[in-house]
Amino acid sequence: MVTLTCYGGVGEIGGNQLLLEDGETRLFLDFGTPYSRWNDYYEEFLKPRAASGLLDVLEMGLLPPLRSLYRPDLEFPDGMWERFRARPAFRDLSDRPIAGVLVTHAHLDHCGYVSFLRADMPVYSTAATAFTVKAMQDTGGSEFEREVAYYAPKKLDGDHLSAEKSGLRRQRPFAFVDGPTLNHNALAFWNGRLAKERGQEEMTWREMDGVGHTTVARPFVGGLPLRWFPVDHSVVGACAYAVETSTGWIGYTGDLRFHGARHADTEAFVQRLASLQPSVLVCEGTNIEHGPGITEEQVAENCLRAVRAAQGKLVIADFAPRNMERLASFLEIAKATGRRLVVLAKDAYILNHLARVAPGTPSLDTSPDMLIYDDPKDRPDYWEQDLRARCAGRMVDARQARREPGSYILSFSFWDLKNLIDIEPYGAHYIYSTSEAHSEEQKIDLERLRRWMAHFQMTFVGDPDREKGFHASGHASGDELLAMIREVRPRTLVTVHTEHPERFVDALRGTGIQVVPPAAASPITLG
């Protein structure tokens, strides 16, 4: 019997935690951070306690109460699981192991809570996804909710958990489904972490204690044939999957779109999945209520006009640097307008290492028009000290931005607004090229951003409440999703990553496709 149990991604955008079971084989489709639920209880200065291990995230319903699924070093030995045994979703999975987790892409709402999974569980992803999450972790500090590529083992210290004093990091066993050949530099990045050894001044790579990775072009997971398909999304390395089960092929879209530069990848995925005649399609539905939106090409054209209109003035572009297509667009815009694109050190670090497995990724090595912003820091992390030392001639500070405002496009986000105090960007143009505010917290942040604009008398271009055309979604429109489903024509459609599953039911009535909106933690029998 084949079952699918959705512990996350049910009636919410993101947080996919989908357990697929076929006989003796168990595997997860993504294991993401459920941000909508997380925001119900937490915020920037109120977070789950690292010293409590699994307790906080289990108690608040952010992780499903599945015994034997998680890292033993995050458990308290004195009856922690007895507290959750009465929960309706409780299961003890100790009778057989999980064969692996299939991660579709590097957004944390799909992979963030891999942090809590057992360290011996294989993580399947593209190399670009793996390199992105590791670079993000290297530059993101010690957030215990984001230990995706490697983790710091914990030990019980009285009534709380603390990291082992050795400082050792254990690496997760990743399987790169695209089977890349990694050169020496790429292997050094993946297998180590930048650290300052005791008694040494130079930076060195400290090997992590782990099994590294394997590269498999035609993988199996738990004995089941697995196929992967590159798709267009707002992050490099995104893919969809198909698993052959005893009830036929089961396809999983992850997140995808048809309106970016890699739209041909998504179109090829639809054709190839249709040829497998899948019995089940597990499909995202972020934009099921929305019609076709703006394309990345149109965003680039609008942003180019906005930069040209700011002739002689400083331009600040607010976009996610991991959106490589948007970053490449701003690089081209900088060239076309006689400027250079200035990114933060953490973004340069991610780009440099991602380029090792994703050819064509803009990086400092391949893009002379890209520079690094020299923001003042008391004690930069070791990775940043190394990057600054190697790129000393590629740094731009606040004084240079003030002196030559028409020479640069600064890639800043809301979280970098504090740097404006040093730059004094009176009269600058701020291009908002990121997603519009959805949650109440994001709306509050947008109001704060408007106050910064007013304080420095800046021109706010692309205010999402007043001006469209400066951001393209990472997700397919409702019409595109429905056309894809009709072409693939599964017997059963399971809707996830959507707040409006009923739209699929209404739109596909009479097609012969059984639409199953899942209930949280309730198994769906497939086939």
Image (spheres, rainbow, N blue to C red):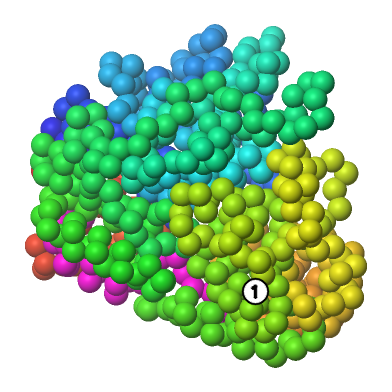
Q: Residue at x 49, y 17 (%)?
A: 72
Q: Is residue 189 visible?
A: yes
Residue 473 percent coordinates (x, y): 47, 69
Task: Look at the picture and state if 404 lies above or below 63.
Answer: below
327 horizontally vs 126: left or right: right
Residue 422 percent coordinates (x, y): 89, 64
Specify the amino acid type for callout 1.
Answer: Tyr
94 horizontally vs 197: left or right: left
| Image-quadrant location for residue 462 | bottom right
Task: Look at the picture and state if 316 lies above or below 187.
Answer: below
Q: Residue at x 15, y 46 (%)?
A: 249
Q: Residue at x 79, y 58 (%)?
A: 393
Q: Residue at x 9, y 62 (%)?
A: 512
Q: Which residues are magenta?
A: 469-493
Depth check: give the residue in front, 377 or 506.
377
| Image-quadrant location for residue 273 | bottom left
Q: Is residue 5 visible?
A: no
Task: Look at the picture and state if 483 lies above or below 171.
Answer: below
The quarter of the image holding the N terminus is top left
Residue 472 part of the magenta-drawn span: yes
Residue 175 part of the magenta-drawn span: no
The residue that disc 1 covers is 432
69 horizontally vs 463: left or right: left
